[in-house]
Image (cartoon, rainbow, N blue to C red):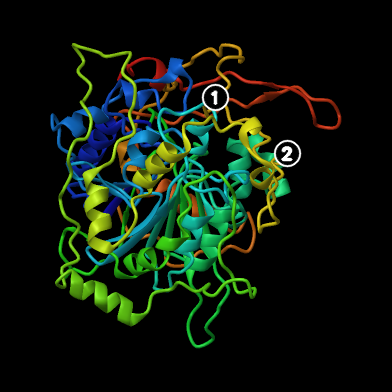
């Protein structure tokens, strides 16, 4: 089965689907599934756009609304997770996942599904330690704080995923698992993104929660985005079962959807041809959801998950065979995810814009049906009920009482001084009120460059089964093979060497960074192509 993997979508569905169709025609092949690794931007109207955590000058409607309204149909089944630039109010309607448009499926805060026998899991958002142990308390209209915290990963989602025991084929996260750069061509990565150097040296680049999941789940493939650079790695896990071969994970991060960027790659993965060509529930995941429903927290107060420390009556919520069989019986042995998409808000109308539209706190009937079917609690409805009972409040430092602001010790430090210290010129910052205006440069192909699609669209094939990882130099060839093969870009695009980041610093290495912010045309105007 051929799977297209895409990095940061940024609402550019038309361009992504056009690229896939170009590849299919070029290679005389058929892509069966598209996986998007966050920043999907499922923006339906102006109210959604105002719930997106980007500066107002970068808020653009893009093309998702056409698929939401039915004007267009996704040509390939699409599965995605959330990132840190999302219409959070819409994704919040589907905490357990669901259809955001026909043939486009969101995995929820965390989720696992099956397609043609492949087990696909994912976790939405990015890791921030100060919000990690809070509940999902945010709701529209968002404050300056909650529009950001809404997309931060929570410990409850990681905890639920860590209850899984069955093998995972593919896993998606937006930010990278911390330390994954040690299993790929780190030198090449730092040549491309030299501003990552300090975080790589301090081992603070990436998510420790994702790293914990990588160690526990040990999927065959792990795909990420967020850092806007293509990077491949091969991680062989410690052998926990002496009578079996150790597991290994092939990691791939991809860029954002822009011309001349490595944003799309097609891989071929073995599947069960006897399985149906439709999306199915995962029995083990449903069992875990039911078992952990009482751990729900919809407040901004922090708490730790149950563990075997003598303080909890239960700490193991892994699924039993009986629990899975009971669910299967309740479903009549039919695990098919129903095609029950329904529009919940008016869609954007280009010839009648509603710029003053405000997002409302909406309950999605898909989630209502899902919770009724499996005896779960609609997190989004619970948040609204909590807000109605407690009154509206702004989540600021002044509003946090001593019990919520002073956190108990946990597995992750809440000191953020060492996190995200580097500046990624491709990333969008939210301090738009105070920041200076950056110049916008579009990336144009070199005049000497003649695109060679035999390279850009090489034959889609199975990734190598084994790769040496003894040193940076030893893995150059294997990871370059992953990065250069199966790579797909927009038609007519070329490769431009990145201009080095200019850094003014003293001998200690500290100082200001002089940046020309590039590739923001995606947020300011329609791309010429």
SS for dot 2: loop
User: Which image quadrant: the N terminus?
Assistant: bottom left
Q: Which mark is residue 417?
A: 2
Give the total number of marks visible in the rendering. Answer: 2
Q: Which mark is residue 430?
A: 1
Residue drawn 50% across the image and 27% down it: 143
Residue drawn 48% across the image and 20% down it: 55
Residue drawn 25% across the image and 72% down it: 327
Residue 478 visible from this viewpoint: no
Spot occupied by residue 51 in the image (x, y as percentages of width and height) = 40, 27
Q: Nearer the viewer, residue 231 or 404?
A: 404
Residue 513 visible from this viewpoint: yes
Q: Which mark is residue 142?
A: none
SS for dot 1: loop
Q: Is residue 409 left or right of residue 186?
A: right
Q: Earlier in the sequence, mark 1 or mark 2?
A: 2
Q: Nearer the viewer, residue 338 or 317?
A: 317
Spot occupied by residue 370 in the image (x, y as percentages of width and height) = 25, 55
């Amino acid at each position: 089965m051929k799977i297209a993997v895409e990095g940061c979508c940024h609402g550019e569905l038309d361009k992504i689907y056009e690229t896939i169709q170009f590849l299919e025609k070029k290679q005389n092949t058929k892509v069966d599934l598209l996986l998007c690794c966050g920043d999907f931007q499922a923006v339906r109207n102006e109210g959604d756009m105002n719930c997106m955590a980007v500066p107002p000058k970068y808020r653009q409607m893009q093309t998702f609304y056409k698929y939401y309204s039915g004007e267009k149909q996704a040509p390939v089944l699409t599965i995605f997770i959330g990132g840190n630039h999302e219409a959070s109010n819409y994704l919040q309607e589907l905490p357990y996942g669901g259809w955001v448009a026909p043939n486009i499926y969101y995995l929820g805060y965390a989720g696992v599904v099956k397609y043609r026998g492949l087990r696909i899991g994912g976790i939405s958002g990015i890791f921030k330690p100060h919000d990690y142990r809070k509940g999902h308390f945010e709701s529209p209209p968002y404050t300056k704080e909650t529009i950001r915290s809404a997309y931060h990963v929570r410990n409850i989602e990681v905890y639920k995923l860590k209850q899984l025991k069955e093998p995972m084929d593919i896993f998606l996260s937006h930010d990278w698992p911390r330390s994954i750069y040690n299993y790929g061509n780190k030198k090449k990565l730092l040549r491309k993104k030299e501003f990552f150097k300090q975080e790589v040296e301090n081992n603070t680049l990436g998510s420790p929660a994702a790293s914990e999941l990588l160690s526990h789940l040990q999927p065959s493939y792990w795909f990420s985005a967020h850092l806007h650079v293509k990077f491949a790695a091969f991680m062989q896990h410690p052998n926990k079962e002496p009578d079996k071969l150790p597991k290994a994970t092939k990691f791939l991060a991809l860029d954002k959807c822009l011309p001349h960027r490595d944003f799309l790659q097609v891989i071929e993965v073995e599947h069960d041809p006897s399985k149906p060509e439709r999306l199915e529930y995962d029995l083990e995941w449903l069992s875990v959801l039911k078992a952990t429903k009482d751990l729900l927290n919809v407040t901004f107060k922090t708490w730790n998950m149950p563990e075997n420390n003598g303080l909890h009556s239960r700490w193991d919520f892994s699924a039993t065979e009986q629990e899975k069989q009971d669910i299967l019986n309740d479903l009549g042995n039919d695990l098919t995810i129903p095609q029950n998409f329904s529009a919940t808000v008016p869609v954007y109308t280009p010839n009648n814009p509603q710029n003053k539209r405000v997002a409302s706190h909406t309950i999605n009937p898909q989630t209502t049906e899902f919770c009724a079917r499996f005896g779960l609690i609609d997190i989004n409805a619970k948040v609204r009920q909590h807000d109605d009972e407690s009154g509206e409040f702004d989540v600021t430092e002044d509003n946090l009482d001593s019990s919520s602001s002073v956190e108990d010790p946990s597995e992750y430090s809440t000191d953020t001084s060492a996190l995200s210290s580097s500046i990624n010129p491709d990333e969008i910052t939210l301090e738009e009120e105070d920041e200076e205006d950056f110049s916008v440069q579009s990336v144009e192909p070199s005049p000497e460059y003649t695109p060679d699609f035999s390279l850009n669209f090489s034959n889609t094939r199975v990734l190598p089964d084994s790769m040496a990882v003894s040193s940076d130099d030893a893995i150059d060839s294997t990871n370059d093979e992953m990065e250069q093969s199966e790579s797909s870009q927009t038609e007519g695009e070329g490769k431009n060497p990145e201009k080095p980041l200019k850094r003014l610093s003293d001998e200690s290495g500290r100082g200001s960074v002089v940046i020309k912010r590039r590739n923001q045309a995606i947020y300011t105007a329609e791309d010429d192509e």
